[in-house]
Image (cartoon, rainbow, N blue to C red):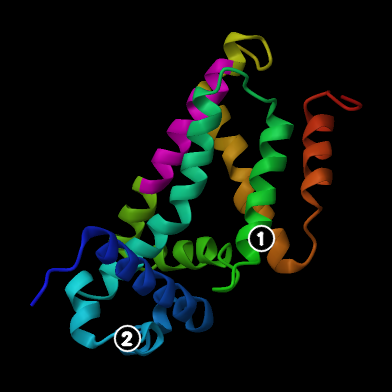
Amino acid sequence: MPRISEERRAERRDQIVRAATRCAIRSGLDGMTMAQVIRESGLSAGAVYGYFAGKADLVAAIVDSQLDEIVGMLHGFAVADELPDIPELMQTLTEEIERLAQSPDGDLSVMVLLSWGDAAKSEASRRLISGRLQTVIEEWEVIVSRMQADGRLDPDADTADLARVVHSTLPGYILLRMAGTAPTPERFADAWRSLLGQAGR
């Protein structure tokens, strides 16, 4: 039997993760079952279990898939020669949230809320979310420290605290979206300018 190429393996794995994501959006992480994922993926049970030993592994893959792009964007900002102000960063990131919400697989931003809900009940999920969140915060710390160094933020403030506060507004934006009361990304950025005393810039 010919071996599957690494590229094909990656495609199949992504196919399974996307199927699991659709199931989770419809049923919640609690309600999602391996049987649902197998049906949704169109693959055999053996194929699915060949990539994921069980539901916990799939949940971890879903969380990673949703955070990887955001982490990548933050890292890009963190190492960029020209670092935008926080309002511009927030507009770009909330535009990304809006894009995720329009995915053909469903509103992917919902997965953030579902993951936290699962973390409230599962120690394994809590460890997973905490670890991935720390990666996000570390990228924010680099961004914030650069802004402290160039005078855009208070150099005497605690960098880690600033990073956590800045990041926390993004989950807040997702909650506002769920309630139907979120401002547009442009207005979200304008609000940040007002908070930072940059109105009109």
Q: Where is residue 70 in the image (x, y as percent from the top left)?
A: 52, 46
Disc 1 target residue:
175
N-term mark: 1 or 2: 2
Q: Quadrant of residue 10?
A: bottom left
Hey, what amino acid is under mark 1?
A: Leu
Disc 2 target residue:
38
Considering depth in this image, is 39 or 132 the residue closer to the camera?
39
In the shown orientation, is residue 5 left or right of residue 156?
Answer: left
For the stretch drawn in magenta, the main secondary structure is: helix
Residue at 63%, 9% in the rendered image? 150
Graded by Cα atoms within 10 Å as few (under 14), some (14 to 19) or many (20 or more), the crowding at tag 1 reads some
Considering depth in this image, is 13 or 2 the residue closer to the camera?
2
Considering depth in this image, is 83 or 115 the residue closer to the camera?
83
Hey, what amino acid is under mark 2?
A: Ile
Q: Find the distance from the CA under tag 1 to the CA under tag 2.
A: 30 Å
The stretch in magenta equals 132-146
Q: Give the quarter of the figure containing the C terminus.
A: top right
